[in-house]
Image (cartoon, rainbow, N blue to C red):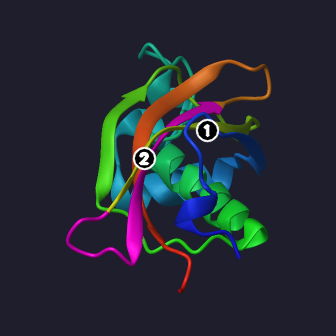
Amino acid sequence: MEYFEDVVIGDTARFGAYAVERGEVIAFAEKFDPQPFHLSDEAAAETPFKRLAASGWHTCAMTMAMTVAYGQERKQALLGSPGIDTLRWLKPVYPGDTLRCETEVVETRRSQSRPSMGLIKTSVTVFNQDDVAVMTFIANMMMQARPA
């Protein structure tokens, strides 16, 4: 198990390979972000996207799926998150893209009110298959401290 004490500022990771599928882009948009450029190529043609593009919120959800899989693979003692900072959608994500993540730990501190856990800030960049950054954010995570 990986605990708070095992995390060091400067730690980096590269993980994930999420294939963006057209049907999933449309299904997500229909339910959560039904703007026309997320629903069809025709509607997107007259926009800066020029073709069907995934919702930024869908990009967040795909990133979350990769992050959870990575945490489970590493057996991290994660306790959830109080939120994210500075979310930026840099480039469109299109059906046919394959996403991956790169992270760097930028801050760690033990919780003063709950010393059985620590707080970790991680800089996250999501790239497409061409190594173009499509999204960045700072993740704030809570992680269990090593049991005494």
Q: Residue at x 30, y 55 (%)?
A: 83
- The residue at which mark 1 appears reads as 103
Q: Which mark is residue 26?
A: none
Neighbourhood count class around disc 2 (C-alpha, 10 Å): few under 14, some 14–19, many 20 upward = many
User: What residue is shown at x 30% (from left), y 39% (from top)?
Assistant: 85
Is disc 1 placed on a helix, strand or loop?
A: strand
Q: Relative to 53, say whether 25 is above or below.
A: below
Front-lying residue, 109 or 84: 109
Q: Amino acid at mark 2?
A: Ala
Q: Quadrant of residue 56?
A: top left
- Magenta stretch: give its range: 111-126
Q: Residue at x 51, y 56 (%)?
A: 61
Q: Measure the C-alpha gap from mark 2 to mark 1.
A: 9 Å
- Seen from the viewer's position, the closer of residues 132 and 46 is 132
Residue 31 screen position, x and y as percent? 39, 63
User: Which residue is outermost to the front?
Assistant: 148
Screen quadrant of the N terminus: bottom right
Query: What secondary structure is found at the residue carrying circle 2?
Result: strand
Compare residues 98 and 78 and report the one nearer the observer.
78
Helix, strand or loop: magenta stretch: strand
Q: How many marks?
A: 2
Residue 132 horizontal/vertical position (percent) = 67, 18
Q: In the rendering, which numbered label is found on residue 139?
A: 2
Q: Residues within 10 Å of mark 1 (few under 14, many from 20)?
A: many
Q: Position of residue 20 (x, y in %)?
A: 70, 46
User: In which image quadrant can residue 64 be found?
Assistant: bottom right
Looking at the picture, which amino acid does disc 1 mark? Thr
Could you tell whether 143 is left or right of 82 in the image? right
Q: Are marks 2 and 1 in contact (CB under 8 Å)?
A: yes
